[in-house]
Every structure is written in structure tokens, then in C-alpha cells.
Image: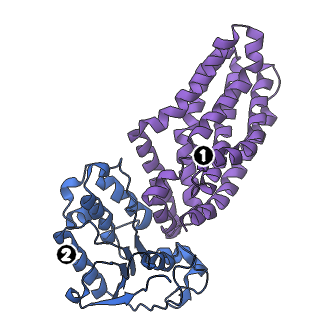
Chain colours: A blue, B purple
């Protein structure tokens, strides 16, 4: 089944592009193609001029993936989950405690993720954003389940990421873009 | 000596995965005990059902313990990647920036530590019921340690190939059992030889070769299967 066709999107350093479109229009699929998780039937994704499929591992080190599934283990505590992500990706300099504090969930540090609310879980997962510096963020519906304060934190993080030259591609079907003039919208039509 | 930072990062990531899997198995203690209890039950039921004939038990003991080990491994094989697939961890492994096959090695070794190793360690207790000699018990332990590693690798391959399928479990058995037969035959044969005073070294070496070959080759097949499953 073809979900996306004739899509051309160019991201420049320091900008945030918001994918918009109704359910089923291919926002997640496009993110997965850009992230290298789904192979396109036709066409290619280039990063800094080079097709990503030439060296997927090196490309993966340049991006941060925040998917629809959080990648957290219910049986482990927030700090245990984040520490593993830090060890898996950014060998040094990462501070999981600071990351949790930034998202206002330092008090959930030693609670198992399975006992947290949906919003708290999303915050733990989002805390991965500040574990290390990578140029490209791919975020699939990052505002889901977040309260206003957490959403605000996320907007500030994205702004800081952009200011540092980082690029962000995110899918958010319910984001009111008029409130965020810095974000560039990119509309996907419903699949025919 | 200079070490490659990417390689150092890989070792750290692999250790992190092993640590996480062990921690998880302690938190979900059923993962650890279910195959072990299953293995112990099969092994103790046969001597009870067949009666205390010393010759008969010594004759069939190696085969029964090995079949029980194979079934116990098969019981949990489908769960190797299931949770990582469902909670999104698998996508993060794929995007970790390391060769996926190397992370798969860590996953499978952790799985073996949780299933194969405990099974190996309790096997001498169960061998008592079959009147196995001391020599045969040692051979049983070595053969199970090596054999369960091969079975773990085969199970992981089956699990990866059937991950995206709804009928994964039945399919997995159909895939893995035929591939496991050589391991079963060689492993049980090694113990039977030792029990009858023969030399089991050749059979054990064959198992060791299989384990080495498997740990190098199986992840190269498992990694692409996992990529296809999440695609």
C-alpha cells in the first residue's frame, strides 16, 4: 500500500518543521523514512548531502528518535530507564538526573515507570532529548499527554536546539501553529 | 594502547543491554523461574512414571534431560524480542548507532544467562534421578551449557523472523525444532557416551564449534530480520 508519494522536503540547520495532516496522511511514515526505520519503495533520504542508506549506523548517531512507542520498560525505574538510554547512545557527559529535573519529574526518579501516569511516562521518555547533543531530532506527536507546563518545556527545548543549529522534524496534528511562528508547517494530504 | 572510541562505546552499550536484561528478569521473576520449573518437572516425572529400574533410567536419562532442556528453551524463545518490539525499545536499538548484530549478541547472551545457564546449573540435581555417573554429570553440564547457547541463538532467530506475525508461537516451533535436532542429537549422544564409559570429547567439541559458529553467524541473520519486523 502506498502511503506517501511525491513528497519532497528539505530541512535546513536550525529550523523546526511541523508535519501536519489528518490521521492516516503519513506523518509517522514520513518520520520513519527520514529516520531510516522504514525503507522507501522509491526515492531517498539524504543527510548533509549523502544518502543515509550508505552508512545507517553513522547517520543514526546524528539523530534522536522519539517515537509513538516510548521505549521504556515498565519494570524499571525512571532513572534506570534513562541511564540505559544514556549508555546506549551518549557514552559520556550525560546526566540522567538533570534530564529528569528539567522535565519536572525528579520526584519520580526511583519509581517504576509502570506506576507512572501516561503524562509522566511521556516526560521520562522526552528527558532523553537532553541526554546528549545530536543535530537532528525526529519527534512523533511529542505533545500527546503533556500538560501545559511540560509542553512549554518542550517548546523551549526545541527553541534552544534550533538556536544551537539543531534541526527538528516533528509530527503534531493538533498543534496550533499561529502561536509558534518559528515553526515551518508542512502539510501532508490524506492518502488517495 | 589506543582504543577506538566507537568500539569502546559499543562494548559499553552491549554491557548496558546485558545489565538491563538481568535486572528485568529479576523484576519479572517468572521469566527466570518458568523454564526452570518446567525443566525440573519433566525431568522428575519420568523416573516416577517409569519405575526404579536402574538400567532403564541410565539408558534413557540423557535423552530425556536433553529433550526437557530443548522444550524449556523453546517455551520462552518467542519472548526474546517481543517486549522490546512492543514497547519501542527495538527501534531505539536499531537507531543506537551501533551495528545491530552486535547488540543482538548482547541480547542473546543475556537471554542465555537467564534461561540456559540456570538450567545447566540445576541439571546435576535432576541427573541424580537417572543414576548418571559423576563423569556423565560433568559431560551433561558442559553439553547443556554449550547446547543451550546454540538453542538460544536459534530461538532468537526464530523469534526475530516471526516477530511481526500473529501466529508467531506455533510458527517459531516449526522453524526452530528442525534446526535444533542436530544439537539435541549431539548433546544427548555426548552424555550417553559418557554414561556408558565412552569418550564424549568429540561430541562436546562439535557442540562448542556449533556455539562459536552460531554466535558469529546467527546475529547476522537476526539483525536484518529485526529491521524487517519494525519496518
Above or below residue A56? Residue B136 is: above
Residue labelled with disc 1: B169
Residue labelled with disc 2: A152
Residue at 48% across / 32% down in the picture? B33
Residue closest to the eye, A110 or B64: B64
Residue at 28% across / 77% down in the picture? A174
Residue closest to the eye, A112 or B187: A112
Residue at 73% across / 7% down in the picture? B53
SS state under label 2: helix
Q: Is residue A126 left or right of residue B72?
A: left
- Where does the C terminus of chain B fall, quadrant-wise? bottom right
Spot occupied by residue A117 in the image (x, y as percentages of width and height):
25, 55
Residue found at the far left of this picture = A149
**Residue A15 visible to the viewer:** no
**Residue A66 visible to the viewer:** yes
Above or below residue B105? Residue B55 is: above
Spot occupied by residue A12 in the image (x, y as percentages of width and height):
40, 92
Spot occupied by residue A84 in the image (x, y as percentages of width and height):
39, 57
The CA distance from mark 1 to mark 2 is 45 Å
Amino acid at each position: 500500500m502506498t502511503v506517501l508519494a511525491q513528497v519532497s522536503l528539505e530541512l535546513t540547520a536550525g529550523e523546526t518543521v511541523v508535519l501536519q495532516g489528518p490521521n492516516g496522511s503519513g506523518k509517522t511514515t514520513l518520520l520513519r523514512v527520514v529516520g531510516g526505520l522504514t525503507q522507501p519503495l522509491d526515492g531517498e533520504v539524504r543527510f548533509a548531502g549523502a544518502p543515509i542508506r550508505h552508512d545507517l549506523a553513522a547517520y543514526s548517531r546524528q539523530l534522536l528518535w522519539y517515537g509513538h512507542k516510548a521505549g521504556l520498560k515498565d519494570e524499571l525505574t525512571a532513572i534506570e530507564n534513562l541511564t540505559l538510554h544514556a549508555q546506549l547512545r551518549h557514552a559520556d557527559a550525560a546526566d540522567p538526573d538533570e534530564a529528569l529535573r528539567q522535565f519536572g519529574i525528579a520526584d519520580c526518579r526511583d519509581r517504576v515507570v509502570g506506576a507512572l501516569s501516561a503524562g509522566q511516562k511521556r516526560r521520562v521518555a522526552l528527558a532523553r532529548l537532553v541526554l546528549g547533543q545530536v543535530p537532528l531530532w525526529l519527534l512523533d506527536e511529542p505533545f500527546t499527554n503533556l500538560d501545559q507546563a511540560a509542553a512549554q518545556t518542550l517548546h523551549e527545548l526545541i527553541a534552544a536546539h534550533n538556536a544551537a543549529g539543531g534541526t527538528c522534524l516533528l509530527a503534531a496534528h493538533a498543534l496550533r501553529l499561529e502561536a509558534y511562528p518559528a515553526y515551518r508547517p508542512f502539510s501532508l494530504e490524506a492518502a488517495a | 594502547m589506543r582504543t577506538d572510541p566507537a568500539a569502546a562505546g559499543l562494548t559499553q552499550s552491549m554491557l548496558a543491554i546485558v545489565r538491563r536484561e538481568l535486572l528485568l528478569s529479576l523484576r519479572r521473576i517468572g521469566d527466570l523461574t518458568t523454564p526452570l520449573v518446567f525443566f525440573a518437572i519433566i525431568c522428575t516425572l519420568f523416573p516416577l512414571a517409569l519405575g526404579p529400574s536402574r538400567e532403564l533410567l541410565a539408558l534413557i536419562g540423557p535423552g530425556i534431560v536433553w529433550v526437557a532442556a530443548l522444550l524449556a528453551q523453546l517455551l520462552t524463545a518467542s519472548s526474546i524480542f517481543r517486549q522490546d518490539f512492543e514497547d519501542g525499545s527495538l527501534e531505539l536499538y536499531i537507531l543506537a548507532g551501533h551495528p545491530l548484530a552486535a547488540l543482538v549478541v548482547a541480547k542473546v547472551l543475556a537471554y542465555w544467562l537467564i534461561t540456559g545457564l540456570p538450567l545447566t546449573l540445576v541439571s546435576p540435581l535432576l541427573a541424580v534421578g537417572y543414576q548418571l555417573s559423576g563423569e556423565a554429570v560433568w559431560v551433561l553440564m558442559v553439553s547443556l551449557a554449550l547446547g543451550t547457547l546454540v538453542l538460544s541463538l536459534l530461538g532468537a532467530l526464530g523469534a526475530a523472523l516471526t516477530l511481526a506475525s500473529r501466529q508467531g508461537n506455533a510458527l517459531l516451533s516449526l522453524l526452530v525444532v528442525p534446526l535444533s535436532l542436530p544439537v539435541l542429537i549431539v548433546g544427548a549422544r555426548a552424555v550417553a557416551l559418557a554414561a556408558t564409559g565412552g569418550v564424549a570429547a568429540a561430541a562436546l567439541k562439535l557442540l562448542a564449534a556449533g556455539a562459536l559458529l552460531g554466535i558469529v553467524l546467527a546475529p547476522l541473520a537476526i539483525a536484518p530480520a529485526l529491521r524487517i519486523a519494525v519496518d
